Amino acid sequence: MRAMRAEEFSGYEGLKLVDLPKPAVSDGRVLLRMTAAGVTPLDHTILSGTFPHQLKSPLVLGNEGAGVVEVGGGTDFPVGSRVMFWGTYGAFEDGTYREWVAVRKEDLCLIPDIVDDVSAAGIPVAYLTAQVALARAGFRAGKTVLAPAIGGSIGNAVTQLARALGAKHAMSSTTNHAKAEQAKALGFHEVIDTSLEKLANGVRRITGGYGADIVIDGIGGEVLSEAIGALAPEGSLTTLGYSASRKTTIDVTNLIVPQASIRGFNLFAQPPAARANAWNVIVPLLQSGAIKPIVAKTFPLAKAADALRYLVEGRPFGRVVLTI
């Protein structure tokens, strides 16, 4: 079985194509033949040796993907079923940059017929994160929502879900004017071009001075600082990523005056019931076409290092996916 494994956490050059045994099915796991794997910023963080939690090399990267059930799915996931899945590192014997994987049944979800495998491979992390974070923030129809970085996986997924679920405003942003135009062409009409105006000013303009009830920020750094200044009275900001920076400076009056709040979010720490509830929201929206995952580019498995480089350095609009 071919797999792309980080022999050491030293950057792109540490990722090597290796031959590993096909995983055995045990402990109620389901054997999948992988068809595609999502590439995420977390994979790069681990590969570069900057992940804050203890992981040991060698390690096959990846924690989401799509595949076909070969063994062990039972009546819920019959042999031949197309499924998408997500799990913490260690939930599969190793990661998903490989040809076969053994997955816990609770981490599987049938792929709607309207969605192809490549698109499905990039759904779980982004959309589960987005939906669970929105639910924890108290989202309901009529709320105003801001999720910076429309071209990124979290920003795009939150914006799509909030809009589909009845947000009064589902706002995002980009620092790139070309991406702002691309977003408009794709139907995202509440995207703030921060090359032309400040993030908070754009939110106030769109909302008639009100602000954002809910901010879901996967960027960190200065974006988080500016987003706090866009909060509505008693609004909340959820921070769950740090692709821009792990450090920022906060003007505490942006929390004190509107009696706003800030909290962290970790998808790995969420209970299975929260993820199951999120799938119950996400799947019907995928089936109806109300939300549509966007794939920027695909790479073959052996080019996983190039895929990560493109994701991190190319900053594409949409997901990057490995085809297997």
Image (cartoon, rainbow, N blue to C red):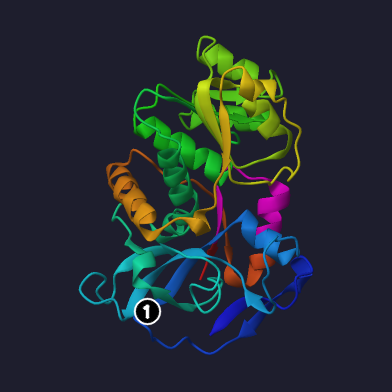
Which contiguous range is marked in magenta? 306-321
Q: Residue at x 51, y 23 (%)?
A: 234
Residue position marked by numbered label 1 in the rendering: 29
Q: Position of residue 319 (x, y in %)?
A: 55, 50
**Residue 144 in sight from this viewpoint:** yes
Residue 133 to residue 214: above or below? below
Q: Position of residue 284 (x, y in %)?
A: 27, 46
Based on the displayed image, in which of its 4 quarters is residue 255 positioned?
top right
Based on the displayed image, in which of its 4 quarters is residue 40 positioned?
bottom right
Residue 319 shown in magenta? yes
In the displayed structure image, the side of residue 62 where residue 144 appears, left or right? left
Q: Residue at x 60, y 18 (%)?
A: 202
125, 257: nearer the viewer: 257
In the displayed structure image, the side of residue 262 where residue 305 appears, left or right? right
Q: Residue at x 76, y 42 (%)?
A: 247
Residue 112 to residue 201: above or below? below
